Amino acid sequence: MQLYNTLGRQKETFVPVHPGKVNMYVCGITAYDYCHIGHARSALVFDVLVRQLRHLGLDVTFVRNFTDVDDKIINRANKENRDWREVAQTYIDAFHEDMDRLGVLRADVEPRATEYIKEIQDLCAKLIAAGKAYATPSGDVYFKVRSYAPYGKLSGRSLDELLSGARVAPGEEKEDPLDFALWKAAKPGEPSWESPWGQGRPGWHIECSAMSESYLPLDIHGGGQDLVFPHHENEIAQTEAVCHCHLARYWVHNGFVQVNAEKMSKSLGNFKTIRDILESYLPETLRFFLLGKHYRSPIDFTADSMDEAEKAQHRVYTALREAEKALQREKWKKIPLPQETADEWTAQPKALDEAMDDDLNTAQALGHIFTQVRIVNRLLEDKNMRASEAGRDILREFLARAGQWNARLGLFGQQPDAFLTALRGMRASRKTIDMPRVEALLQERQAARANKDFATSDALRQSLLELGVSVRDTPEGQDWDLE
């Protein structure tokens, strides 16, 4: 498998440090608010990466942390007059609820920063003893950036470039504007812990170094592109300055999410939480949309793109439903498939594997899934092929392959009728269609057809069409959907 390594700025063959075993650490959320679509993308990317590594037979230990003490958590607690621990727990619980709905597998280990205070202090002490950090008279501890020669190797930034934007704020006791905080002296009313430097709390970057320490050297360290600098750059510096090893062999970062071609922000009024989106779309639709672009590419969230994702899902689930129906036949004919169709069908699993092995190219993998859907639809439309043993075998394999897609991508694993009904209901709700009225017209039309009153049946079909509902008559009865 090839993975793009931010550290080397190229795709590299993935080779674990220990054969057959993978230690992967991904930076999780700061628990002060509901997760937004950017969090969803990052979680899904690493969820699929874990699934792929396990598909390849590797034993993966997946660690994803929670930052549960931070300025933002403290500020929210003060604003709402709540305990900071309660605020953090609220949004950790909300994270789990949101990710469960999106089908994101739980991490094997979910450390919290406040559970690692001793390890954080020990790491600070080691850095001070090694001459890589220093304590100030006020009780802050800073990392000496210039003491770590490779600083900037992940982000590609030079010290001169960083120095141009660096400054020392009034009251700070930094020796150098580039230095960053490992431990922060307590301020009145803030959570704090006793330390060799007085009451204080950890800085953001040191938390991840302490939480990942027992898994070193990591095979993969991941997170959003926004974490490359300064967070991951600082993690590397403070960890490697004392462990004398590589923090991680591969650094994997996912691209940004925009909303209607603009950067998402509360000030622009385009801030989209997962919960906002799932009021209007099914969880699997959001998952499908986010996996529809290569993970390193930027992705633009729009209502149109989500509607297109629904249409694509509809095609797959309809094909699965029709395949299930076609397999209910009891007798089959011995008619061979055209060789070209058989060859195309046989080639698809390998093509999908190659896409996933090529830096987790989910967009290309989905393309191969839709090739298989087209083959199945052609087969279902051909009466001879649909009734043949060869066709039967393809339909059976189609359903089996869908199980594999679900295991690897978390897609197309629902019961087709249930999904299509839920999708129809979600679209009707979004379009504010009067569903009681639709149901009543469908019942009237069914009665009219039973009475062979086809004029009334046609008139009711037109009334439904005016409401945005199309009706198709099948051997099993009326099948309706939204236009």
Image (cartoon, grey):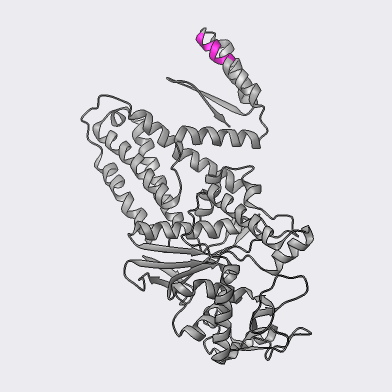
Q: Quadrant of residue 183?
A: bottom right
Magenta span includes 446:
yes
Out of 238 and 37, give the one closest to the viewer. Answer: 238
Outermost residue toward the left in this view = 334
Q: Is residue 411 above or below residue 463?
A: below
Q: Is residue 35 left or right of residue 250?
A: right
Q: Quadrant of residue 151?
A: bottom right
Percent of width and height locating residue 15: 35, 71
Q: Please state the extent of the stretch shown in magenta in the rendering.
A: 444-450
Classified by dominant secondary structure, the portion drawn in magenta counts as: helix
Percent of width and height locating residue 208: 55, 72
Out of 399 and 100, give the one closest to the viewer. Answer: 100
Q: Is residue 229 visible?
A: no
* Residue sitting at x 55%, y 36%: 423
Instruction: State which quarter of the image contains the N terminus.
Output: bottom left
Q: Is residue 200 above or below residue 263?
A: below
Percent of width and height locating residue 73: 70, 64
Q: Quadrant of residue 471?
A: top right
